[in-house]
Amino acid sequence: MSSRYDVVIVGSGPVGTAIARELSDLDPALRLVVLEAGPVLGPVPGGHVKNIADPAARAAVVAPVTGTDRPAGSTPARPGTALVGTAAMPNAATSTNVGGMGAHWTCACPRPGDDEMPDFVDLDEALDRAEELMSVTTAAFERAPLIGTVQKLLGERFDRPGRRAVGSMPVAVATAADGSLHWTGPAVIAGDLWSRPNVTLLPSTLARRILHADGTATGVEIVAGGERSVIGARAVVVAGDALRTPQLLWASGIRPAALGRYLNDQPQVMAAALLSPADVPDISASELVPVSGVSWVPYAQDRPFHGQVMQLDASPVPLNPGVTVRPGQVVGLGWFCKKEISADDRVWFDDAEPDGNGMPAIRIDYRLTETDHAAIAAAKAEIAEAAAALGTPLGEPFVMPAGSSLHYQGTTRSGPVDDGTSVCDPAGRVWRTTNVYVGGNNVIPSATACNPTLTAVAFGVLTARALRAAL
Ligand SMILES: Cc1cc2nc3c(=O)[nH]c(=O)nc-3n(C[C@H](O)[C@H](O)[C@H](O)COP(=O)(O)OP(=O)(O)OC[C@H]3O[C@@H](n4cnc5c(N)ncnc54)[C@H](O)[C@@H]3O)c2cc1C
């Protein structure tokens, strides 16, 4: 055993980083190590790549994996991600770098509402802390051209008593004194974490297996630079995303019945519209900000869709002869639906066919039910109405391939009791283990439509507190 820590955390995305940060804040004497399979991108470990000013340097670290080996039915991978899905979920993707997907994300941080919220745990205060850790604000795009117009038109269509009002999307973005935007990557969550004496970040280090006996983990087998070694631990937290967290548990022989099951990807419907000329004052292109406005049509139980509305960067180029597009005038709409949760939707692992890391290969079973198809049809109808309310719809609404949301949830879901339908308790401790914890969107048990990262970090806050108490 080469070294020994109090806690080994696997994964340096927003959740793994938040758990490390909370643990270290609660008890600076704790010896923590964060293992990350991927390398550091850019000058700041876990920094959001959009903060890299030089376009060439930025492009060099976000090349998506595209090409002929894409699964049938997929669209090209988003920057910074690699497609890992199969035909059942062709757009399933992961990021492997310090910061995980959190180095590439759009930073939308809505709170879950109504029945999106799990009913066996009170998350409110942890959500407050998660917002604080990620610098969440609704003010980042206040000065975006036409954002007020977009919100007024959508508010007239969707605001009702009892619903949360249409408004600015809460985003994890800070605005500097000079007006420039700083996107929250895990580096912001970390603060000075990586320079604290008892905290270590090990990039390009794969957690290969959790070592355990009688339900108690004793360490983690790691592979770095082709060399295998073992590090000792009093507790292990796996926050390796919703596909690879269950993969590591499976590879370690920790296999609760619900492991990998209840996989939940939010079906995503897209549309676009051009704001009516009557609503568009003559705005100069110099007022353009990097993304000119992110608005929110919050989920409500009586219209179960989460609406993310992004005014697209548009230099004033003619759309059709005679039509000049103003900054902020082209509006992209994304409606996320709740998925009907089923134990049969799952990620499972093929021991017979190891992946490039020698881990059991990821396989996905996933099916849309009649209820899901009905929800998608309703979302298409509603997003078409939203586009028409904004002005001139640009084309027909369309449904993205499964996996496009990048919001995979449920595969190590939490639950109030160990009844075979969950993998961990509300604080992320894996049932029938004393000291193995899981974190990430995979812990979220409920059918949500909203972007999940804020909720996952809130669960991570609970994990850190419970783990600190247990230690
Ligand atoms: C383009 C894009 C836009 C997005 N927009 C939004 C948004 O607006 N709002 C939102 O809520 N979410 C968004 N997401 C999703 C969001 O980024 C994820 O929900 C979030 O990053 C999940 O955090 P995590 O820490 O659980 O996992 P990740 O960020 O995926 O990090 C997991 C890390 O664990 C590492 N790892 C896995 N297995 C191992 C192992 N065995 N050993 C060592 N390391 C391992 C991985 O390499 C990875 O770096 C977006 C994602 C992308 C790519």
Image (cartoon, rainbow, N blue to C red):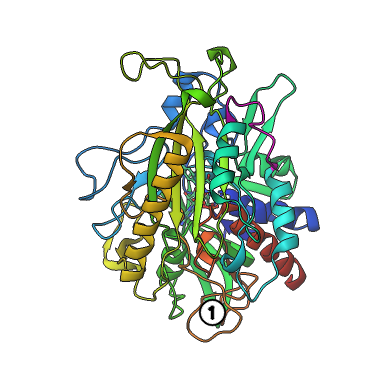
Viewer-proximal residue among 43 and 54: 54
Q: Residue at 21% of width from left, 44% of height from top?
A: 69
Q: Mark 1 Cα within 10 Å, few/some/many (few <14, many 20+)? A: few
Side of 436 relative to 468 (left or right)? left
- As for residue 143 lying within the magenta part, the answer is yes
Say which quadrant the C terminus sits in. bottom right
Mark 1 lies on a secondary structure that is strand
Inspect the image, locate mark 1, and give the three-letter code of the amino acid beneath it.
Ala
Residue extent of the magenta highlight:
135-147
User: Overall secondary structure of the magenta stretch?
Assistant: loop
Above or below for 414 versus 172 = below
Above or below for 34 versus 322 = below
Above or below for 421 versus 460 = below
Side of 368 relative to 383 (left or right)? left
Viewer-proximal residue among 35 and 429: 429
Q: Badge 1 is on which residue?
A: 213
Side of 98 relative to 401 (left or right)? right
Q: Pick out the residue farthest to the front.
A: 278
Q: Position of residue 463 (x, y in %)?
A: 67, 65
Say which quadrant the N terminus sits in. bottom right
Q: Is residue 226 among the parts visible in the rendering?
A: yes
Q: How many dots with numbers?
A: 1
Q: Residue at 58% of width from left, 79% of height from top?
A: 433
Q: Find residue 26 and report its image quarter.
A: bottom right
Q: Position of residue 62 (x, y in %)?
A: 43, 33
Viewer-proximal residue among 215 and 25: 25
- As for residue 435 lying within the magenta part, the answer is no
Q: Is residue 28 among the parts visible in the rendering?
A: no
Q: Position of residue 439 (x, y in %)?
A: 57, 62
